[in-house]
Image (tube, rainbow, N blue to C red):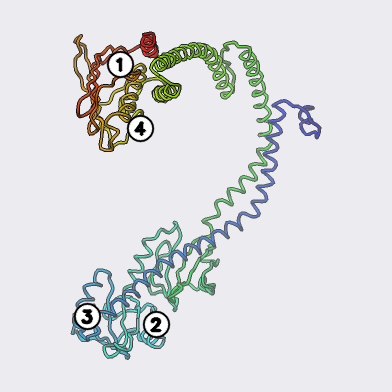
Amino acid sequence: MRKLFSAFSLTPATASITSYLTLLAAAIAVPLIAFATFLFVEIEANERKELRERATTDARALGRIVERHLTDMTSTLRLLAVFPELEDGDLRGFQNRTQHILSSHSMYLILMDETGQQLLNTRVPYGTPLGPTSNKDALQAALSSGKTTVSDIFFGKTGGEWVFNVTMPLPENLRDVGAALVLTQGTDQVQAVLSREMIPPGWSAAVIDQTDMVIASSGASGLPTATAFPADPHNGFSRHSDAVEFEHGGEAMVSGYARLPSFPWVVVVSGPVASVQSSVVTWKLLIFGSIAFIAMSMLLAYLVARQLSRSVRQLSRMAERMGRGEVVAPLETRVLEVNQIAVALCNASFDRSEAENRVHLLLRELVHRTKNVLTLVQAILRQIARQSATKEEFQEAADSRLQGLAQSVELLAQENWYGVSMHSLIDQHLTTVGVSLNQRAIDGEDFVLGVSAVQNLGLVLHELATNSIKYGALQSPLGCIRISWTSADDRRDEPGVLLEWKEEGGPPVTPPERSGFGSVIIERHAAAAFSASVTLEYRPDGLYWSLHAPWSALRKDGSSNPLDAVSENLTYKAAE
């Protein structure tokens, strides 16, 4: 206990893991009780506030959908009012045309005069005797205001169902035809709009008109159409959108409502307040449960801390042995994570030993590779020096060849010295020296070159491309090179390959007066590196070069000592 109290001291002190874990349990549990008590006071009010906001938001969302439906009907009326049949007074043609358009939307068009007498109705054939409208109030309101209006629901005599009208006064130039166009639609269509929207279980939605009559409803309430909306929630519908709480059947309810901005209808979403009370009950149980279990938690934390402290000490001793370079065996404790760490340390100690061995091996391999590359570079420089007359000529030739070798080494490094595909090698060297895609044609099935082949063939390709740019077909914008390879048995009846380089479209080429280091690379070095026969011809239409070699000299598995092959070949040529 002395160590436990020292953890509370303001002076710097160390303590066991048992003390810290016990203190941690108390530090978590005690504030939790205080915080849960505060939440219990606030959460119910916050939940009700969120419920009111959600109900209002849902009512606004449904209101926008109903508003869009009515707006579409209004737009339809504007469109119908400009039909030429109406302007010409051809009511029969106007009815036939509109009846065909509106039939698929469950809407019907009525043309009325100022007294409300129906002049046509697409519910019935043209010429059927018609009476006055059942909703003259909506007609008079539209005519007096000069604006499109939406009526309350009423029972339509012609259709024999509950309907509503969208009435649009006609302009003065059409008043000799009629006073207003009316789109009428059954309330079942508004019902269908509501039914398509997801409403939470136990909740309901309704659309009501100016007289508080239900136009359509969905959800748990199932209010019938043309019945009065309950007075309790409606008493609070005084603002544009809000939520009100009320009692219904002894149960607390909340209603969110929203008035349509352009029409005199209201959308209401209602549900029980109890739908959010489950979290409040959960918090009550949490408070009482935390008080009941706090003592048990402290005791369990202390016991677990002792076991963990013992296991950590064992793990510490194991780490010390590992630090001395030993390969350690895993521990067996009652703590799974400690056992996992012990196994990880055991594996790490073994891996460390193996890694040290691999480092030594890699260092030896690096020394070997570096030595061979430097030998290769030395051989190239000696040959260039023998062929160069001036320092500038030597520098230019050395830069070009070393750049070609560097491109091959870079490709090998990107592939972890595994090998490089034939297409990648060709593309790298031709692109480096500036050969565009429209100046080259590649024909041959791609395959992976061995390390030795990448470096040797890279030198040859770089030399051929450089010479073509300086002296061959690539001097001309119309010149091009064709590289192809096909299987062909070599002179030893082994599986072989014939690699060809053809230049076309350039100036005529002639054999050089003096053979330089480039000729050594593309002829003698290529033949020696691949145990191949090399053909070099200066044809009138362009340079031709071919390499007839066994597949084993080029493919990935063809050489076991890649760096030795290329360095020894060029070293031999340098000595000559």
Report the disc number at residue 147.
2
Residue 402 location (% of width, % of height): 42, 22
Q: Earlier in the sequence, mark 2 or mark 4?
A: 2
Q: Point out residue 457 in the picture as x, y percentages from the top left corner.
A: 32, 20
Question: Residue 333's quadrant in the figure?
Answer: top right
Q: Quadrant of residue 511?
A: top left
Q: Residue at x 63, y 17 (%)?
A: 319
Residue under the point 56% across and 12% down: 329
Residue 104 to residue 490: above or below? below
| Residue at 55 percent of width and 22 percent of height | 340
Q: CA distance from mark 3 to mark 4?
A: 73 Å
Quick one: label 3 or label 1, which is nearer the N terminus? 3
Kindly identify the amino acid type of the residue bearing the numbered disc 1: Ala
Q: Name the residue nearer the viewer: 75 or 314.
A: 75
Q: Position of residue 5 (x, y in %)?
A: 78, 31
Looking at the image, is mark 1 or mark 4 earlier in the sequence? 4
Instruction: Please report contact status of discs 1 and 2: CB closer than 8 Å, yes or no.
Output: no
- Give me the C-alpha separation between circle 1 and circle 4: 22 Å
Picture disc at residue 355: none
Badge 4 local density, few (<14 within 10 Å), some, or many (20+)? few
Q: Is residue 2 left or right of residue 270?
A: right
Residue name at image x 27 percent, y 86 percent: 118
- Residue at disc 1, secondary structure: helix
Dot 4 corresponds to which residue? 431
> Mark 2 belongs to which amino acid?
Lys
Q: Secondary structure at mark 4?
A: helix
The residue under label 3 is 94
Residues at marks 3 and 2, CA–CA distance in whole angstroms: 23 Å
Report the amino acid beneath label 3.
Phe
